[in-house]
Amino acid sequence: MLNLLRHSRPFPAGYRCFHGTSLVSAGHSKWQNIRHDKAKNDAKKSKEAFAMATRITTSVKQGGVDGNAQLVTLIEKARKANITKKIIDNAIKRGTGEGTGNAAQTFEVMYEFMGPGGVAFIVEANTDNKTRTIGLVKHALSKFNAALSPCQYIFQRKGEVVFEPASASESFDEIFEVAIEVGAEDVVEFDDLDGEYDGETLYKIITDPSDLNAVSNSLSERGYKLRDSKTTFIADGESEVDFPEGLEKSMAKCIELLDDTAEVTNYYTNIRN
């Protein structure tokens, strides 16, 4: 029997507006806006490339290069995001243990926070300087009055595979049977909250993290096109909480700072959908 699992959804970061009050200052402000937006976009692209490279390296370490359907999917996502071949190749080399020059050694770290109203945060990062990164993460979470505190016990670590149906006519019951065959714990129609897949009909399998590569490979061998394959944290249903009223701005600032921290690769909360 497959168990239905629920998970929290991310919250959007806040926005900033700039304006000038005279013709000269307006022109100056417009140029400053262009520079600011370009810098912010460049930083976002850099962070996306860093996060994807980290996922590629981890995939290679766990599943090797040959016959690794998860790796194929990640490389395809990286190319669509215009991440350079050099970054992809170096990520693969780090996974296989090959030398990549004088690149600094990095560490995967995880931080646990508790905030107002029982809101829990798990923040994952990949860093070459743990002291710097914990300082940046603590600063971001302080905007929401959250502090370091154990909370992983209210989450479950799971594997997640997003994939296309084999054909437009394939029914959910048929998908369900395939999910059972490949060893899934659950399968649901994928809810594309971020609009990444332009409203395509996709499905999501939930599995044990240790089975993620095997399930991904099994789906690929059956002819299914994978769109994503990753590990995630899902809050236990009884541990989910409502968003605390009146803290929207502080949460937005917190999320903005986390998004602006290059080392942060993901974060999760137990906020009810």
Image: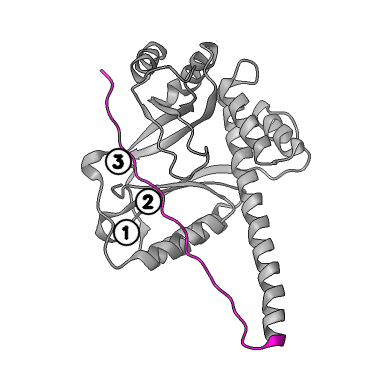
Compared with 124, 29 (above or below) is below
Residue beneath disc 2: 121
Horizontal side, residue 147 vs residue 195: left or right: left
Callout 3: 10 Å neighbours few (<14), some, many (20+)? Answer: few
The label number, if any, that marks residue 153 in the structure image: 3
Label whose residue precedes the other's in the sequence (2 or 1): 1
Residue drawn at x 46%, y 18% is 215
Residue 5: within the magenta?
yes
Q: CA distance from mark 3 to mark 1?
A: 15 Å
Choose the circle earlier in sequence order: 3 or 2: 2
Amino acid at circle 3? Tyr
Alpha-carbon distance for marks 3 and 2?
Answer: 12 Å
Q: Is residue 141 magenta?
A: no
Q: Which residues are magenta?
A: 1-24
Closest to the camera, between mark 3 and mark 2, is 2
Decide if residue 227 is on the left or right side of residue 184. Answer: right
Quadrant in which residue 1 is drawn? top left
* Mark 2 vs 1: CB contact within 8 A: yes
Prevailing SS of the magenta stretch:
loop
Residue type highlighted by circle 2: Phe
* Residue 231 image position (x, y, % from top left): 46, 33
Q: Are marks 3 and 1 in contact (CB under 8 Å)?
A: no
What's under tag 1, amino acid-wise?
Answer: Gly
Query: In the image, residue 81 lies at what x, y percent?
Result: 65, 41
Q: Residues within 10 Å of mark 2 (few under 14, many from 20)?
A: many
| Front label number (3 vs 1) | 1
Number of marks in the image?
A: 3
Query: Element under label 3?
Result: helix
> Badge 1 is on which residue?
115
Give x and y (percent) for residue 178.
40, 13
- Picture quarter containing residue 255? bottom left
Kindly state the secondary structure of the residue where label 1 is placed: loop
